[in-house]
Image (cartoon, rainbow, N blue to C red):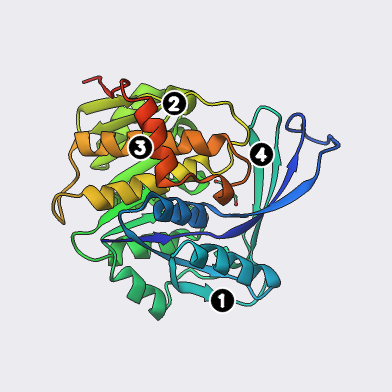
């Protein structure tokens, strides 16, 4: 089974600060660090380190020196980059401040990630081999929609609706949800899709539009919703060093687990299967929060297994 990740790749330029600065404020930070980043590339690395599925990446880098570095990041993980095209101009760059409590603020200069609204032939070839596809919204919506509409019949399509600005447009949200099997959002992204109607009403409304909804809830874990059934997946306790990329780690591991454990092509995974995958993804995300950097913080499958073994008694709770 191949997981195809359609998404962004960035160089993350990170400054650590005591706290996130306010508007118009200048703070003195610590050393500047550069990491491999981008929600798409982070998710691809997470899926690859999770094991159990081949991983291929569909995206774009620029024509600057960062392009080769970012391509190598992926290839070093064994990720197929035949769908990673080169376009003129800069590779995507994210300017990130990370506060002492691990929280971050991110501005992305999209660069090559925004250069294409249509998949190129080499990228469509990669997509044609997908057993599962995962995308985010750091690349143009038409590209995501094309991937959703052209993926192989019977493949699983996961959308991590981040960043969610495009989802505030009802027609865009409806188009994207119509091609989605598994939607992963946090509470803010959920509100962008459903409007300010409260979390519970938003869950009910959005769960009617996708076969599987997963709402990540930070330190409260994650909620898995399939139709009217729900499972609460507890979080793992961690000391936060850097939250950057933790959500991507969750999504990449989730995609790899669902691809590896899918009973039959074309079927929506059962809620227990999704809850199990979300528990593993949650453990991986917890480990990611404890280390600096986006891709640098993605744990190995062994480290995740160790954490799960230590936390074995904590089961998912049925809330339906
Ligand atoms: O989700 C974290 C990622 O968001 C960072 O790696 C940064 O590149 C931005 O895309």
Q: Residues within 10 Å of mark 1 (few under 14, many from 20)?
A: some
Labelled disc at residue 280: 3
Residue located at (82% from left, 38% from top): 29
Labelled disc at residue 86: 1
Of callouts 2 and 1, the N-terminal one? 1
Q: Which residue is mark 4?
A: 105
Residue located at (51% from left, 57% from top): 41
Residue located at (35% from left, 30% from top): 309
Q: Secondary structure at mark 1?
A: strand
In percent of width and height, residue 260 lies at: 25, 52
Of callouts 2 and 4, the N-terminal one? 4
Of callouts 1 and 4, the N-terminal one? 1
Q: Secondary structure at mark 2?
A: loop
Q: Which residue is mark 2?
A: 236
Q: CA distance from mark 2 to mark 1?
A: 39 Å
Q: Secondary structure at mark 4?
A: strand
Q: Residues within 10 Å of mark 2 (few under 14, many from 20)?
A: many
Q: CA distance from mark 1 to mark 4?
A: 28 Å
Q: Is residue 113 left or right of residue 66?
A: left
In percent of width and height, residue 104 lies at: 65, 37
Q: CA distance from mark 1 to mark 3?
A: 34 Å
On the rendered image, what quadrant is the C terminus found in?
top left
Would residue 168 be visible to someone looking at this image? no
Residue located at (77% from left, 29% from top): 18
Of callouts 1 and 3, the N-terminal one? 1
Mark 1 or 3, which is nearer the eye? 3
Of callouts 4 and 3, the N-terminal one? 4
In percent of width and height, residue 31 lies at: 80, 45
Q: Secondary structure at mark 3?
A: helix
Whether residues under marks 1 and 4 lie with C-beta atoms below 8 angstroms apart, the answer is: no
Mark 4 or 3, which is nearer the eye? 3
């Amino acid at each position: 089974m191949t997981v195809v990740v359609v998404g962004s790749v960035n160089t993350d330029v990170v400054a650590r600060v005591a706290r996130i600065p306010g508007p118009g404020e200048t703070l003195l930070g610590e050393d500047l660090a550069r990491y491999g980043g981008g929600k798409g590339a982070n998710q691809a690395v997470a899926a690859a380190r999770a094991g159990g599925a081949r991983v291929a990446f569909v995206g774009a880098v620029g024509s600057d020196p960062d392009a080769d570095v970012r391509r190598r990041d992926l290839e070093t993980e064994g990720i197929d980059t035949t769908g990673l095209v080169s376009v003129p101009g800069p590779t995507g760059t994210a300017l990130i401040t990370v506060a002492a409590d691990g929280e971050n603020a991110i501005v992305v200069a999209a660069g090559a990630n925004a250069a294409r609204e249509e998949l190129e032939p080499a990228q469509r070839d990669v997509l044609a081999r997908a057993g599962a596809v995962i995308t985010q919204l750091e690349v143009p919506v038409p590209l995501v929609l094309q991937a959703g509409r052209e993926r192989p019949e019977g493949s699983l399509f996961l959308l991590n609706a981040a960043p969610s600005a495009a989802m505030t447009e009802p027609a865009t949200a409806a188009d994207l949800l119509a091609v989605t099997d598994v939607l992963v959002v946090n509470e803010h992204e959920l509100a962008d899709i459903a409007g300010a109607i409260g979390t519970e009403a938003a869950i009910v409304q959005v769960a009617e539009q996708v076969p599987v909804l997963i709402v990540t809830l930070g330190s409260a874990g994650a909620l898995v919703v399939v139709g009217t059934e729900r499972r609460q997946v507890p979080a793992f306790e961690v000391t936060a060093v850097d939250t950057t990329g933790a959500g991507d780690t969750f999504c990449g591991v989730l995609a790899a687990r669902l691809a590896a454990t899918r009973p039959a092509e074309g079927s929506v995974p059962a809620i227990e299967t999704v809850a199990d995958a979300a528990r593993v993804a949650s453990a991986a995300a917890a480990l990611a929060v404890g280390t600096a950097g986006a891709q640098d913080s993605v744990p190995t499958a062994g480290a995740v297994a160790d954490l799960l073994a230590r936390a074995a008694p904590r089961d998912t709770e049925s809330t339906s």
